[in-house]
Image (cartoon, rainbow, N blue to C red):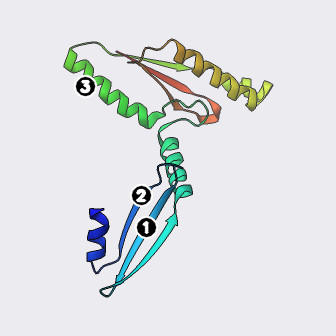
Amino acid sequence: MARVEKALQSKDPQSMEFQCSTSGCHYEVRFIVSGEDKVLLIISNVSRRKETEAKLEYLAHYDSLTDLPNRYMFNDRLAQAIAHAERKKQLLAILFLDIDNFKHINDTIGHKMGDQLLQKIASRLMTGMRKTDSIVAYQRRHRKILWHVLAR
């Protein structure tokens, strides 16, 4: 409420955002104060924009096919793992897994089946992982994934 009072006291246009807790909707409220007793409120539903921003944020850090962290997240997790290993004076293992001739799989049984195979491999690799380990879809050129496994 203090933010609203401050906005009303200001002579400059003010903008703030709030979330409707019951429905999960996001609204943006703009205050334009005109004179002593006149305020124009513009309320916009920005839920779609928020959903799009969240999706873009997710896609910036995760592989869209396997839902595994991508190479950008890998770099961050690797830096954390190195720092942790140095602090604890422990070893760090990185395993690179590549599927040879994956293009042949896509060419013979189709990209849809190739995608399903990659999803199944990612799922199976994840089932054997400890919570402190990471598996990352590092690159997927020509529908090929190079996975990195960080183990502490």
Q: Label 1 near label 2: C-beta < 8 Å?
A: yes
Tell me which residue sits at (63%, 25%) in the image. 119
**Figure quadrant of residue 30:** bottom left
- Closer to the camera, 2 or 66? 2
Q: Which residue is mark 2?
A: 18
Quarter holding the N terminus? bottom left
Question: What's the distance in space between the residues labelled 3 and 1, CA to CA?
Answer: 43 Å
**Mark 2 residue element:** strand
**Three-letter amino acid code at the position of disc 2:** Phe
User: Looking at the image, is mark 3 or mark 1 earlier in the sequence?
Assistant: 1
Quarter holding the C terminus? top left
Question: What's the distance in space between the residues labelled 3 and 2, CA to CA?
Answer: 38 Å
**Mark 3 residue element:** helix
User: Looking at the image, is mark 3 or mark 2 earlier in the sequence?
Assistant: 2
**Three-letter amino acid code at the position of disc 1:** Val
Q: Which residue is mark 3?
A: 83
